[in-house]
Image: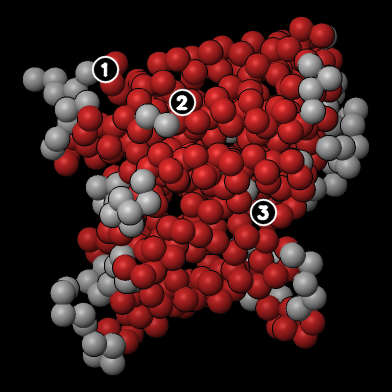
Amino acid sequence: MKWYKTKDLITVGFALFAMFFGAGNMIIPPYIGLQVGDGWNSAVLGFGLSGIGLPLLGIIAMAKNKGSLELFAGKISRGFSVLLGTLVILCIGPMLAIPRTAATTYEVGVKHIFPGISPIISSIIFFLLTLYFSISKSKVIDILGNILTPILLLMLGVIIIQGIWHPIGEIVVTEVREPFGKSFIEGYQTMDALASIVFAGIIINSLKSKGYTKSDHQIKLAIFAGIIAAVGLFLVYGGLMYLGATASSLYPNSIDRAVLLIDITDSLMGPIGKISLGIAVALACLTTAVGLTAATGNFFSEITRDKLQYKAVVVTTAISSMFISNIGVEGIISLSEPILVTLYPVVIVMITLNLFDSFIKNKSIYLTTVVGTFSVSLFYGLQAAEIDLGYLGKILSHIPLWENGFGWLITAAIGYLIGEILFNTKLWPQPENQ
């Protein structure tokens, strides 16, 4: 007997796609395509792994933990789960991701359709709409899945199909030697792996409100919804990256990300293209802003046991994001890079460990692995912030995969092995609750 409604599955899957697909997802793939040129196929795989694969694994890992961040990260300690959750929420919430959605909406859409509107007015209107759609906690998923996402997919489909049918230029060989590794790191800018560990809670709560009370049903539906979102993201990312690759013979690598996307669309569809792009960008950014704002409200209301009420957090998030959004897209991206290259590896490791949690007898291994990861990712962050590491930088450069941005894999593995050795030799006492 069929225990779920197909409509519910599609609604939740579309909603998850909409929450993931926002400002960075729109402007980064074409820019990568421009930079890698004929290497765009490898770049799609690299970007797909970090921008799609990791978020999907994050949804699965969180679904296994009933959408609870405390269960997900609390294997180290409750304090760590609060710290990690707060850092992630601030990144994908009022500090970086939400402001970027409003900034992108203005720079790619509003400014070119309504040139007389100032960025301040644009951000006020944007966040009033965000508040309208996110203020009701129980209706967020239905609004995203049934109304906004289908319109968004239609607009994106028109632009991508036109670009495939009538390429604007030739795809050329570029100087990028490792398109896979470069695009994998660029995938951090989507912030979707970070978002997945808080979006899952919204998805689980939505499924509960729809009458799915059994835990195994919630997990299965959350995973299926994640797969639907992943397929949609892969098709859109591949299309946008191809459009960027066809522009590799026409534009310099120094071009602004937002300007590149506008020029490509203008070349493909003329003035109507700018309007179509403006609508698509506004919808992509609005759906993500709604999802992230709801996630922020949901997180802080839960960890404070409703001392910080959902609606109050949502309003505060919208107001603070509105102010930060006015520093512009490129400014926000520059601010986010050091934070993301530091935090992302830690989240990747936590997702991986949670997926294989049933095989990990000693949960203290979580701590040693995370410490091993952070011991290197921190220096990637300092490097991204253009802080001179001096002689230490020379030492770190000898770590395998350091130059590719994956040096933390080695120290994470070392941290895991240290945890295993300490546990097996009884040097690390087993917690009483295990």
Residue 227 seen in the current view: no
Looking at marks 1 and 3 on the same chain, the residue that comes earlier in the sequence is marked by: 1
Q: Which amino acid does label 1 sit on?
A: Thr
- Depth order, front residue of 41/98: 98
Of helix, strand and loop, which one carries label 2?
A: helix
Label 2: few (<14), some or many (≥20) within 10 Å?
many
Q: In which quarter of the image is residue 72?
A: bottom left
Residue that carries the numbered disc 2 in the rendered image: 133
Label 3: few (<14), some or many (≥20) within 10 Å?
many
Residue that carries the numbered disc 3 in the rendered image: 336
Q: Which residue is drawn at 46% across and 40% down?
A: 314
Lateral position of residue 27 relative to residue 246, left or right: left
Of helix, strand and loop, which one carries label 1?
A: helix
Q: What residue type is labelled 2?
A: Phe
Label 1: few (<14), some or many (≥20) within 10 Å?
few
Residue that carries the numbered disc 1 in the rendered image: 6
- Depth order, front residue of 22/112: 112
Q: Which residue is drawn at 28% across and 92% down?
A: 427
Q: In this picture, is 356 found above or below 230?
A: below
Q: Nearer the viewer, mark 2 or mark 3?
A: 2
Looking at marks 2 and 3 on the same chain, the residue that comes earlier in the sequence is marked by: 2
Q: Which amino acid does label 3 sit on?
A: Ser
Tell me the quadrant of the picture where the N terminus can be found.
top left
Lateral position of residue 280 relative to residue 290, left or right: right
